[in-house]
Image: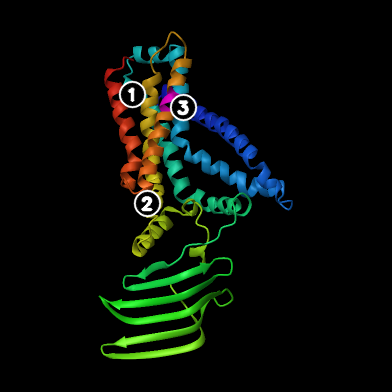
């Protein structure tokens, strides 16, 4: 690596850290202002808890989430200042091609993207669990499971049904479990109520009946009370508020497979999260490429216009991402396509700019 590469890389990474710190300071101040009333509702909640259980985790999550945009802003900031000081002209005049000039930027973007992928894939989800639980406990309204006639497919040929469920007492009413052999019913378990027994980690069925059907023979067993293991857990009836943020990539893939097996309607939300984690590192590279092209030309008006243009393009990127995400979660677009549309769009714009904008 040449001296000029080290020089650009150092300035790029330093500016990236600086931009992240500035933006996070603003976001945290806004968040504190919004949530201070919620915190004051709980006298037992200490400042140490708020910082350790919420804000440290919140900062890590948000900082990683906005990494593509902060990388873009840092790229524009560094390159525009170098262009303003005629450093870019001097580098190109010395025989260094524009493609070669991009190398230290791509090295820095690759480092940032790789670290971001590792963080959001396996490290940050662990801290997100604590943050999300804190939000559920102190900033969100109490959750009540109010859905009726819940149907769950727990295995390819096994279906559960619960008419109503009280997640405060972990008790369900009018429960049935049916097992099929292709289209024929071969087993049915029903109960008036089911209750979770935490000490045994089993379900307690009351006024239950078990029917075993074998060709033309039917065997019926019934009783007042029995403990059994079912392929569901009370946590499935708890608040699922942003629970995907607390899942590693492996857990996310497993959860998506489970939701598809059960025919759940909200699987798109988890798929959008999955594909977003994969696309973010590529977004870092694409936005770095665009940032250099936007700001490499010296402007008579100084660097202000180029930095403003950088923020404008950042806004457009966010707009594209939000629109695609909304369409995917509504089922109007495939989640993978919705997540990659901003990257494809900005990559196309970058290539056009690279071809036609003088540098």
Give residue 312's position: percent from left, percent from top.
43, 24
Q: Is residue 243 visible?
A: yes
- How far apart marks 3 and 2 lie (CA) works out to 30 Å
The answer to whether marks 1 and 3 mark residues whose Cβ atoms lie closer than 8 Å is no
The stretch drawn in magenta includes residue 311: yes
Q: Which residue is mark 3?
A: 73
- What label sits on residue 100 in the rendered view? 1
The stretch drawn in magenta includes residue 312: yes
Task: Classify 271 as above or below 338.
Answer: below
Give residue 296's position: percent from left, percent from top.
39, 18
Image color mode: rainbow
Label 1 packing within 10 angstroms: few (<14), some (14-19), many (20+): few
Mark 3 or mark 2: which comes first in sequence?
3
Find numbered disc 2 in the image and state the secondary structure of the residue it sits on. helix
Q: Which residue is mark 2?
A: 268
The image quadrant that residue 76 belongs to is top left
Residues drawn in magenta: 310-314
Furthest-right residue in this view = 43
Please tell me which residue is depicted at 57% across the width and 30% down the height of the picture: 22
Which quarter shows the N terminus?
top left
- How far apart marks 2 and 1 lie (CA) works out to 41 Å
Label 2 packing within 10 angstroms: few (<14), some (14-19), many (20+): many
- What label sits on residue 322 in the rendered view? none
Give residue 56's position: percent from left, percent from top.
60, 44
Mark 2 or mark 1: which comes first in sequence?
1
Left or right of 36 in this view: 261: left
The image quadrant that residue 278 belongs to is top left
Please tell me which residue is depicted at 36% across the width and 64% down the height of the picture: 262
């Amino acid at each position: 690596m040449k001296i000029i590469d080290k020089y650009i890389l150092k300035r790029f990474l330093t500016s990236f850290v600086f931009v992240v710190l500035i933006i996070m300071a603003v976001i945290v101040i806004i968040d504190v202002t919004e949530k201070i009333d919620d915190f004051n509702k709980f006298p037992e909640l200490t400042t140490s808890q708020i910082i350790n259980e919420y804000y440290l985790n919140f900062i890590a999550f948000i900082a990683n989430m906005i990494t593509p945009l902060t990388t873009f802003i840092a790229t524009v900031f560094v390159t525009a200042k170098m262009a303003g000081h005629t450093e870019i002209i001097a580098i190109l005049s010395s025989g260094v091609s524009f493609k070669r000039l991009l190398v230290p930027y791509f090295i820095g973007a690759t480092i940032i993207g790789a670290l971001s992928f590792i963080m959001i894939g396996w490290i940050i989800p662990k801290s997100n669990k604590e943050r999300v639980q804190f939000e559920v406990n102190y900033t969100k309204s109490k959750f009540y499971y109010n859905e009726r006639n819940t149907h769950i497919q727990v295995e390819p040929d096994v279906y559960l049904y619960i008419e109503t469920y009280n997640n405060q007492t972990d008790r369900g009413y009018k429960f049935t479990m049916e097992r099929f052999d292709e289209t024929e019913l071969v087993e049915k378990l029903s109960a008036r109520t089911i209750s979770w027994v935490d000490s045994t980690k089993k379900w307690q069925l009351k006024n239950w009946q078990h029917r075993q059907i074998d060709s033309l023979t039917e065997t019926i067993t019934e009783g007042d009370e029995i403990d059994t293991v079912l392929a569901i857990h009370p946590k499935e009836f708890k608040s699922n508020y942003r629970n995907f943020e607390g899942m590693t990539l492996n857990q996310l893939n497993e959860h998506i497979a489970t939701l598809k097996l059960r025919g759940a309607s909200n699987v798109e939300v988890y798929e959008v999260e999955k594909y977003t984690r994969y696309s973010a590192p590529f977004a870092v590279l694409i936005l770095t490429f665009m940032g250099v092209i936007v700001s490499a030309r010296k402007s008579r008006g100084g660097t202000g216009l180029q930095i403003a243009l950088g923020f404008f393009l950042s806004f457009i990127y966010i707009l594209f991402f939000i629109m695609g995400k909304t369409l995917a979660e509504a089922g109007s677009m495939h989640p993978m396509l919705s997540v990659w549309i901003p990257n494809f769009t900005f990559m196309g714009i970058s290539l056009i700019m690279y071809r036609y904008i003088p540098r």
